[in-house]
Amino acid sequence: MCSYSEQDYKLALEESFNFSSFKSEEQKIATECIASEKYKNIIISMATQSGKSLCYQLPRTALQRSGVVLVISPNISLITNQVAYLSDLRIPVTSLTGITPRLVRRDLIDRLEDSKANPYQFLYLTPEMLIKGSESIRFLIETMMADGDISLIVMDDAHMIIDTGIDFRHCFSEMRTIRKMFPDIPWVALTTASLESIKMIGKALNMEDPKIIKGPSTRKNIFYDVRKIPVNSSIKELIEDLIESDKKQEKHVTKKIYDSGIIYCQMNQEADRIAEELCESGISSESFYGTKNECNLILKNWKDGKFPVLVATEQSFGLGINRNPLKYVVHMTSPKNMRAFYQQSGRIDTSPGYSRLVYQRNGFVTKEMKEYATHTGCRHQYIANFFGDEENEPCGNNCDNCVTKERLDRKGKSSDGSKSLEVKRKSF
Ligand SMILES: [Zn+2]
């Protein structure tokens, strides 16, 4: 077992990652748990964009843990981002995914096979590569495990095992088989989930008595609202309306609100129609869905800032859409469930950022989303409840329902003839 001082962590954060401190107490605790080598099974549940990856990256990179950290992630875009991020920090990292060219793949396997020559600290792998990839990859991973070259296995987006495709589940069950063969290698599952789901994940991954670290799910930078709109409403008006609501909140507003946004809808034709309508009204946008031929180019151009608004179908989620900064996410149709909604709006990384759910009567896919849309209390609180957070207070002024309540309270006070209530706004 290893123990490190506050000073060790401070130095590690500064020297390897250019951070002056941990982002949150949960991030610190999770990192310490992994670094301590005390636990064989750890499940870390933290909000999206809260720095979960650092928890396993720091112990390997800055605290001199040996061996390769194997990260299984279903999201190629996330893998690409992480590889680029670590490479920028001069941390030896590589990946094997469906987009790795065959020759590069062969060369990588050769390097990884020779533990003495292997220069990498992190290996990112898609579940598909492990299961449907070549025999040589499976053999490589098993050999590395048998030789003690893999010091930690990280399962990213671990909730996928309980709520998405059969392929992925199949892969996880394969991982379980591998796990049985090498029970001494510690596992970490990363997710954002309720306690109930965390337990299900642990069970599905065959984790015995896992150490659970659960941080708050609240995303304080996001303003949540829900709009009921008439059929055939103009999408441009809807975005302008977003700016209007921003003005009402007396926040700094610039044209930049157009700079980065995702509009989610369900059907490909709908995505085309919305993108076209936005272009006609002077807001440059493109539709994006998996089956579109020029898909990669569209995503690249959007990420490079060549146009501001991406109109995506919910199915594009698997393709991984990330762009920094991302100011707003508008759901034109209800996502399939709260988790999908939370994940998709969780891509927003500006402060303030905006998440809007738009709906027409009877436009709900699930009861879960209808409940969120028609909820009259604080939306942050609703989300926190959904994920089973212990601390759970109304946001006060960071969602439509709280703002309305606050306005009504103020009005009530003024009409009583009492002193008007000065509303303190949160500074972001
Ligand atoms: Zn609220």
Image (cartoon, rainbow, N blue to C red):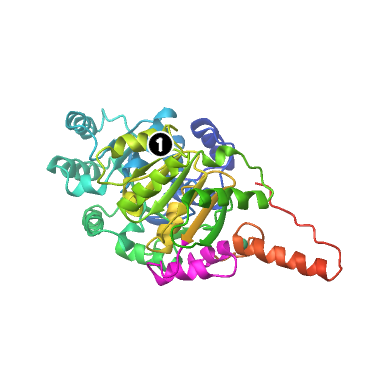
Judged left or right of residue 399, residue 179 is: left
Q: Quadrant of ligand 1?
A: bottom right
Comparing 150 with 398, the one in front is: 398
Position above or below: 299 against 393? above
Q: Which residue is mark 1?
A: 302
Q: Quadrant of residue 174?
A: bottom left
Percent position of residue 89, x then y = 44, 29
Q: Secondary structure at mark 1?
A: helix
Judged left or right of residue 26, residue 104 is: left
Position above or below: 177 against 96? below
Residue drawn 40% across the image and 49% down it: 274
Judged left or right of residue 112, residue 373 is: right
Percent position of residue 184, x then y = 30, 52
Q: Is mark 1 within 8 Å of ligand 1?
A: no
Whether residue 20 is visible: yes
Magenta segment: 359-388
Whether residue 155 is visible: no
